């Protein structure tokens, strides 16, 4: 498993009856890879995994594996209310042909370190697939600190990467200070990518890449190659959109950007509701201002979702 580059945490597109739009997901995966993304991460927070049934998750994973045809890794996000179901989904992902797992803490329950270690360890042990740990204390209330990551790395050889979403770029340096190159660190917060790369992050599990993959890849490449002026110019343009990844309505906002560029629709599953009123108009204005000043680096791809 090559843990590097821009791997979008893909959204889950829904039809008018709120069933999963598999046709769109197939084309979306291909567009992302055609624009330079290095992998696909389905079923995460941005993929509304908490609203998907077990069978829907399995079907989405199978669709993604078929869509990429081995041209890039599919990293299955593994999350559940129970350890038993998380282990079952991990095994299913391996059987389907996923290349790696992104392991989340359990939904809802905010356990202590002993419990969280037992949960993620059970998923790590479930398959021989390479695993990424998803640390997002803001969303899940569980914080995997550098010393926890060190302990897990000593016990699980297939634990290879961390998606660091604490929104504290210092964590990237702290993990590397403890573990060196043993664990690859990915930034999981869109508006911290340049800062994260500057202290050693190797990849980006990206949100806005769902709508703007070429710009996301270009920003990552400029930062990783030390092209500071180019990175800053692109970052300055991109930041109003990247910040949409950091608020509670991040799913609705990123899907809105997708709709504005012709790469999806705005449907979300309850309890989420689509943006409305002043909040919607302000978001649209931010998006449209950005798109009027869009850098000329993107290929002309457009995927039509069912409307």
Image (tube, rainbow, N blue to C red):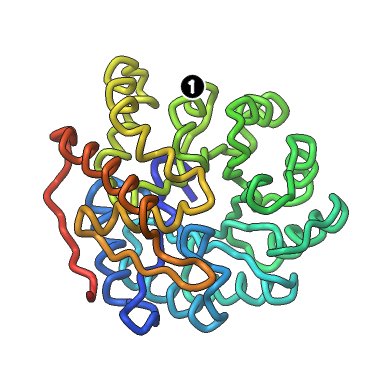
Q: Is residue 8 left or right of residue 143?
A: left
Q: Is residue 61 left or right of residue 101?
A: left
Residue 113 position (above or below residue 204): below
User: Mark 1, residues whose alpha carbon is within 10 Å: few (<14), some, or many (≥20)?
Assistant: some
The one of 40 and 124 positioned closer to us in this rendering: 40
Which residue corresponds to the image point at 69% horizontal and 60% vertical from the top-left?
124
Which residue is identified by label 1?
A: 198
Q: Is residue 9 left or right of residue 49?
A: left
Which residue corresponds to the image point at 35% horizontal and 58% vertical from the top-left?
255
The one of 242 and 29 positioned closer to us in this rendering: 242
The one of 292 and 94 positioned closer to us in this rendering: 292
Q: Please identify the residue farthest to the front as the structure is shown.
A: 278
Which residue corresponds to the image point at 45% horizontal and 58% vertical from the top-left?
41
Give the percent coordinates (x, y) of residue 268: 42, 68
Give the percent coordinates (x, y) of residue 266: 33, 64
Local secondary structure at mark 1: helix
Give the percent coordinates (x, y) of residue 91: 61, 74
> Which quadrant does the C terminus fall into?
bottom left
Which image quadrant is residue 111 in?
A: bottom right
Which residue corresponds to the image point at 35% horizontal and 40% vertical from the top-left?
241
Give the percent coordinates (x, y) of residue 159: 66, 50
Residue 56 position (above or below residue 266): below
Residue 54 position (above or below residue 74): below
């Amino acid at each position: 498993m090559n843990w590097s580059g821009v791997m979008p945490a893909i959204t889950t597109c829904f039809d008018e009856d709120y069933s999963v739009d598999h046709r769109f997901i197939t084309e979306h995966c291909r567009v992302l890879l055609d624009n330079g993304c290095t992998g696909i991460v389905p079923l995460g927070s941005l993929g509304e995994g908490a609203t998907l049934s077990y069978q829907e998750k399995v079907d989405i994973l199978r669709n993604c594996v078929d869509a990429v045809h081995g041209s890039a890794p599919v990293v299955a996000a593994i999350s559940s209310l129970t350890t038993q179901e998380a282990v079952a989904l991990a095994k299913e992902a391996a059987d389907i042909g996923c290349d790696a797992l992104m392991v989340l803490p359990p939904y809802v329950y905010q356990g202590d370190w002993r419990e969280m270690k037992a949960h993620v360890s059970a998923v790590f042990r479930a398959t021989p697939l390479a695993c990424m740990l998803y640390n997002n204390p803001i969303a899940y209330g569980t914080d995997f600190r550098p010393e926890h990551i060190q302990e897990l790395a000593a016990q699980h050889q297939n634990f290879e990467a961390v998606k660091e979403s604490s929104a504290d770029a210092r964590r990237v340096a702290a993990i590397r200070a403890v573990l060196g190159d043993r664990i690859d660190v990915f930034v999981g917060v869109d508006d911290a990518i340049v800062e994260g790369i500057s202290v050693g992050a190797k990849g980006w599990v990206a949100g806005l890449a769902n709508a703007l993959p070429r710009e996301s890849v270009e920003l990552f490449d400029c930062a990783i190659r030390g092209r500071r002026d180019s990175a800053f110019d692109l970052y300055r343009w991109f930041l109003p959109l990247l910040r949409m990844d950091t608020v509670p309505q991040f799913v609705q906002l990123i899907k809105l950007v997708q709709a504005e560029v012709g790469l999806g629709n705005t449907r979300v599953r309850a309890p989420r509701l689509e943006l409305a009123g002043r909040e919607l108009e302000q978001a649209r204005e931010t998006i449209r201002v950005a798109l009027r000043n869009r850098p000329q680096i993107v290929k002309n791809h457009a995927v039509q979702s069912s409307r």
